[in-house]
Image (spheres, helix red, strand yellow):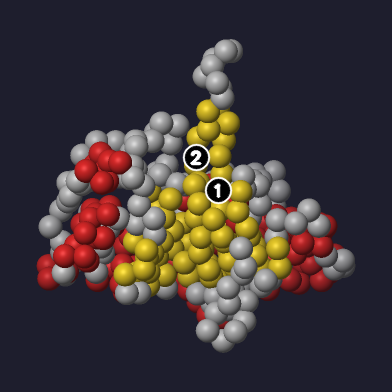
Amino acid sequence: MSQSMNAAGQHYLLQAIDLKKHYPVKKGLFAPERAVKALDGVSFTLERGKTLAVVGESGCGKSTLGRLLTMIETPSEGELYYQGQDLLKPDPAAQKLRRQKIQIVFQNPYGSLNPRKKVGQILEEPLVINTDLSKAERREKALSMMAKVGLKTEHYDRYPHMFSGGQRQRIAIARGLMLDPDVVIADEPVSALDVSVRAQVLNLMMDLQQELGLSYVFISHDLSVVEHIADEVMVMYLGRCVEKGSKEAIFNNPRHPYTQALLSATPRLNPALRRERIKLIGELPSPLNPPPGCAFNARCQHRFDTCVQFQPTLKAYGDQLIACFVVDRDEASS
């Protein structure tokens, strides 16, 4: 498939085309091998300085997507481009580029930092591996990055256990930025933090985005956080994208029944913005044994015969992409 370009005729900063990740599973010695479709054909584009939020319940494939984008895991199928360059080519230059230009900030600041290393060592490690900087230059860059994320010079020689959760996440963000990346994959970066600290870390991320021209793929299940930081939103369900559009379109006019249910559960201070709560019945289906037809049909109050028989594909409705036969039917009848 050919790569597309943005309106200015330039390659997108990051482009994923039909990314899939299937894990083989054996139930027994003589049982046939089956596949867990953790990610089943996800496509998106990301422009410089923008934030794409990926939302959905646990088990929908958000974190799997994050691991594929940073090549912690390799896709089963699909294409991935950084500024038009194929990142999946078995090419040392492409792999070095990928390591430097696409970084990840993990969910748990308590588990993602090596407890035996001081903050200075943690921050300088990517520079030791990927650059030829001298010891003095590495230290200078580490201290500069610490200042950017609101850490003091004396923190350089301290161990992670001496910091609070919010400070640890600042260290994790600083480490992710040490190689001057263009894209940061933020996998639930504030979900382990207290509410007051969460706002500080989010504001820090937005300030850094403006200052450094960063692009974020922001993975979250918390829609109030997403509304604060996102430019575009991609809603995922059981390994597939079910709705995608600008933040304004998704929050003001959610069309897919799953998106509507997610947004109805988001707390609102303004009574005028509160939605009637839509309760989803049943559990998220197993990716090892998804239901026939639309994966959401067993939990959807609007389903009809077609939903049980066929799988909907993403279609454009105005500025939104939606995979839903109910929306299809409503559009046809209007």
Task: Check disc 1: other Cα within 10 Å, few if <14, some if 14-19, many if 20+.
Answer: many
Q: Quadrant of the N terminus?
A: bottom right
Q: Is residue 148 above or below residue 19?
A: below
The residue positioned 70% from the left and 60% from the top of the image is: 87
189 to the left or right of 138: left
Residue 131 marker: none
Q: How far is mark 2 from mark 1, CA to CA? A: 8 Å
284 to the left or right of 173: left
Q: Nearer the viewer, residue 87 or 179?
A: 87
Identified by mark 2, the residue type is Lys
Q: Secondary structure at mark 2?
A: strand
Identified by mark 1, the residue type is Lys
Residue 121 visible in the shown view: yes
Q: Secondary structure at mark 1?
A: strand
The residue positioned 49% from the left and 47% from the top of the image is: 40
Residue 20 marker: 1
- Indicate the position of residue 252 as horizontal and vertical percent values: 24, 71
**Residue identified by numbered label 2:** 37
203 to the left or right of 122: left
Q: Quadrant of the C terminus?
A: bottom left
Residue ranking furthest to the bottom: 8
The residue positioned 30% from the left and 41% from the top of the image is: 309
- Indicate the position of residue 333 as horizontal and vertical percent values: 16, 65
